[in-house]
Image (spheres, grey):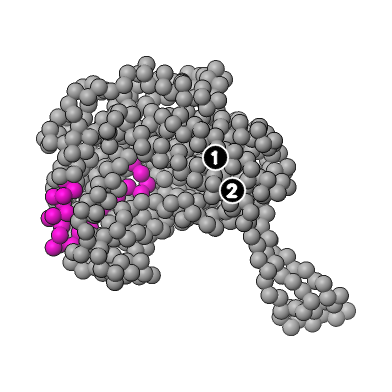
């Protein structure tokens, strides 16, 4: 889930030029209420501390001089001690020791740890959701939804703990049996991004633990509090179930931590979410030491809207997919490919819905659009809008900044709809912000070609009432994305469906029915029960 960062899963990708001022043209028409009161720094800090304590975090033990800033108001809500790269060796060694005992524990018994983690997550759902909202700006329901994903993957992984199946394979040699077996792999390194600060860790950790692997986690430096709270709950679960120490460890720090994990030969699998740029740095370096990597990178997702589409349903699907989380999801809808017969109505409907979107504090009642993660994300958005205009685009609605007077260090924006003449360079390049490009097509083949003509291949969708059109979009010569939906937006796959994409999205798959195989090694066994020694392929070798 990309935050377009470096190998550490850090801050939002950026570029930056100037910004439209708060209250710019079109702002008054959008749903934010002028004069909305944002929570004070003291209120946010108090909420964060209470949530951390309830999750079992020792605040004195983690205290340091590195501020944790909330995008809600741009002010610090805590300070932590950062670890350095020198600590990576110690942490990985401890995880390796835990692996040597954990791998021999029967998988269903390992599942008991994950079951207890799921119970604790359910008990502390609101605490974790609060921390997610405060650290990354997700509105309350989306933050709670992310924690629900954590609970869901625990339930899923517990079931998988009794289904780590091999298979019997037919042998050409009489009196022989050939079989496939699966064994724990080793220490798993997880580098997560800010936009899903806890769900990504849980996807990897729940599966890794039932597969017999310890986890070392490098969270985004933008969301360390959520990480520490999640890890504290797992530590409690481990203590209550008698699991060995060192199964779960968190490294809070800067990019050097992520780089050390990437290079460390004690990390058997490196799972990383972030930008394509990050993936290009991580993938070859892990491969160079013959390690495994699981990469989930950029999106640039599109929806095709056909003349037969239910436009009420379509509008709802587009608005949530494009504006939810202030456009900072890996599955955010970036492009609408609308048939020329319906593009005007689709654009008008979406723009009208955008004007009604309440923009404000993510922990405020009724808010649907919270803040961007920070200044660099805002600058990148403004630069992309300028580039779109230069390439013939028209900003139909949005793009301005909100609440700058009340919170000059926070970056609330109006989600933008931009009508484009075609798929220009700026459309093909993903900007991690709430910009929705709308462009026309004439034939379904043309729409499919436009959908596929971007470097990324995560999620796609088609809105249609025509069964043949839907099947064509799902076919081998249809969408080339890892997730392909019909009459729903560019959502991610639910737990049980393999989340991930193709092309520059990295090809990794998490949380699906056979995703556990990424966390295990496969062996082939040949068992001879015949008392003879026939050779395969007709080979004779008599001595």
**The residue tagged with tag 2: helix, strand or loop?**
helix
Q: Is residue 20 left or right of residue 238?
A: left
**Residue lying furthest right:** 543
Magenta highlight on residue 527:
no
Q: Is residue 138 left or right of residue 123?
A: left
Q: Quadrant of the C terminus?
A: bottom right
Quadrant in which residue 444 is drawn: bottom left
In this view, 467 is above or below 351:
below
Q: Measured from the top left, where is residue 390 in percent x and y?
A: 16, 47
Q: How many marks do you count on the picture?
A: 2
Quadrant in which residue 241 is drawn: top right
Crowding near pointer 2: few (<14 within 10 Å), some, many (20+)? many
Magenta highlight on residue 334:
yes
Q: Which mark is residue 272?
A: none
**The residue tagged with tag 1: helix, strand or loop?**
helix
In this view, 147 is above or below 161:
above
Camera-side residue of 370 and 98:
370
Crowding near pointer 1: few (<14 within 10 Å), some, many (20+)? many
Residue that mark 2 sits on: 158
CB within 8 Å, label 1 to label 2 = yes
Residue drawn at x 25%, y 47% is 319
Q: Measured from the top left, where is residue 366 in percent x and y?
A: 27, 33
Magenta region, residue range: 328-351
Q: Measured from the top left, where is residue 292 in percent x and y?
A: 57, 52
Q: Is residue 176 left or right of residue 260?
A: right
Residue that mark 1 sits on: 118
Quadrant in which residue 360 is drawn: top left
Q: CA distance from mark 1 to mark 2?
A: 9 Å
Q: Quadrant of the N terminus?
A: top left
Evaluate whether residue 501 shows in this view. yes
Give the mark, 1 or 2, whose residue is nearer the N terminus: 1
């Amino acid at each position: 889930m990309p935050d377009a960062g470096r190998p550490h899963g850090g801050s939002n990708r950026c570029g930056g030029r100037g910004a439209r001022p708060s209250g710019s043209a079109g702002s008054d028409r959008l749903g934010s209420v002028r004069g909305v009161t944002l929570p004070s720094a003291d209120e946010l800090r108090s909420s964060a501390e209470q949530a951390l304590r309830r999750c079992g975090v020792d605040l004195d033990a983690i205290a340091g001089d590195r501020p944790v800033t909330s995008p809600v108001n741009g002010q610090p809500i805590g300070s932590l001690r950062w670890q350095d790269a020198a600590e990576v060796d110690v942490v990985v060694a401890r995880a390796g020791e835990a692996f040597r005992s954990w791998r021999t524990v029967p998988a269903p018994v390992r599942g008991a740890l994950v079951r207890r983690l799921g119970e604790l997550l359910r008990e502390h759902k609101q605490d974790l959701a609060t921390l997610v909202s405060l650290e990354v700006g997700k509105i309350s329901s989306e933050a709670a939804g992310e924690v629900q994903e954590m609970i869901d993957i625990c339930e899923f992984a517990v079931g998988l703990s009794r289904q780590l199946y091999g298979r019997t394979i037919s042998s050409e040699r009489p009196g022989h049996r050939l079989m496939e077996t699966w064994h724990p792999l080793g220490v798993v390194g997880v580098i997560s991004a800010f936009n899903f600060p806890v769900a990504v860790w849980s996807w990897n950790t729940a599966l890794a633990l039932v597969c017999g692997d310890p986890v070392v986690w490098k969270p985004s430096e933008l969301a360390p509090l959520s990480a520490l709270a999640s890890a504290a709950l797992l530590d409690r679960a481990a203590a209550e179930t008698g699991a060995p120490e060192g199964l779960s460890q968190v490294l809070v720090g800067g990019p050097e931590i992520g780089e050390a994990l990437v290079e460390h030969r004690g990390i058997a699998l490196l799972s990383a979410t972030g930008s394509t740029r990050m993936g290009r740095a991580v993938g070859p370096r892990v491969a160079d030491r013959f390690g495994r990597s699981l990469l989930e990178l950029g999106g640039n997702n599109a929806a095709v809207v056909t003349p037969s589409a239910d436009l009420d349903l379509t509008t709802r699907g587009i608005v949530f997919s494009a504006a939810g989380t202030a456009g900072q999801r890996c599955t955010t809808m970036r492009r609408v490919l609308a048939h020329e017969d319906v593009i005007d109505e689709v654009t008008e409907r979406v723009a009208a819905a955008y004007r009604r979107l309440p923009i404000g504090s993510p922990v405020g009642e009724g808010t649907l659009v919270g803040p961007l993660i920070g200044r660099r994300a805002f600058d990148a958005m403004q630069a992309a809008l300028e580039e779109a205009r230069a390439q013939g685009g028209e900003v139909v609605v949005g793009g301005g900044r909100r609440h700058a007077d009340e919170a000059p260090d926070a970056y609330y924006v109006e989600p933008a709809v931009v009508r484009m003449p075609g798929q220009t360079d700026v459309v093909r390049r993903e900007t991690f912000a709430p910009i929705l490009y709308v462009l026309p097509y004439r034939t379904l083949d043309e729409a499919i070609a436009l959908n596929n003509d971007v470097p990324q291949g995560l999620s796609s969708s088609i809105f249609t009432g025509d069964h043949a059109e839907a099947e064509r979009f799902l076919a081998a010569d249809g969408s080339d994305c890892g997730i392909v939906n019909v009459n729903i937006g560019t959502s991610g796959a639910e737990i049980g469906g393999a989340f991930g994409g193709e092309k520059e999205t990295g090809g990794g798959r998490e949380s699906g029915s056979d995703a556990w195989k990424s966390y295990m090694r496969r062996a082939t066994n040949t068992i001879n029960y015949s008392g003879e020694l026939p050779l395969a392929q007709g080979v004779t070798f008599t001595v």
